[in-house]
Image: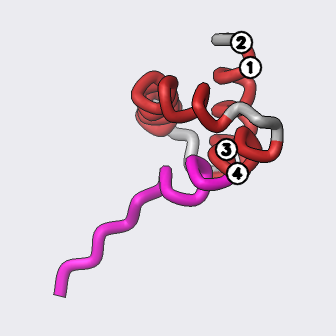
Amino acid sequence: MHTEINIFEKPIERIRKTCELMGLGADFDRKLPELETHLEGLVAEGETSEERLTVSGLTFLKQRR
């Protein structure tokens, strides 16, 4: 049995919910590819904390507005 762990699943879902609560759901969908690339870069640098990935992702989206 092969199980794949996706470290991005929880941070992306938290970011999506936050954007929806702020009325920015459409922005989230449009910027999702850039967000995923940003998060992948952080993981490549060794970041594994879901909380830090979430905060960094939210900061990234805020700067892209």
SS at mark 2 in the image: helix
Labelled pair 1, 2 in contact (Cβ < 8 Å): yes
User: Closer to the camera: disc 4 or disc 2?
Assistant: 4
Which amino acid is tagged 3?
Answer: Ile
Near-viewer residue (62 or 44): 62
Q: Residues within 10 Å of mark 1 (few under 14, many from 20)?
A: few
**Does residue 40 lie above or below 48 as drawn?**
above
Residue 30 tag number? none
Q: How many marks?
A: 4
Residue named by callout 2: 63
Q: Quadrant of the N terminus?
A: bottom left
**Residue 8 is covered by the magenta coloring:** yes
Q: Disc 3 on helix, strand or loop?
A: helix
Q: Earlier in the sequence, mark 4 or mark 2?
A: 4
Residue type at mark 1: give it: Lys
Q: Earlier in the sequence, mark 3 or mark 2?
A: 3
Are circles 4 and 2 on residues that touch, CB within 8 Å? no
Q: Which residue is mark 3?
A: 15
Position of residue 54 in the picture relative to residue 12 (left or right): right
- Residue that sits furthest to the left in the current view: 1
What secondary structure is marked by label 4?
Answer: helix
Who is closer to the viewer here, 31 or 51? Answer: 31
Compute the Cα span from label 4 to label 2. 18 Å
Q: Are marks 4 and 3 in contact (CB under 8 Å)?
A: yes
1 or 3: tag closer to the N-terminus: 3
| Quarter of the figure with the C terminus | top right
Residue to which mark 4 is pinned: 17
Q: Residues within 10 Å of mark 3 (few under 14, many from 20)?
A: many
The span picked out in magenta is 1-14
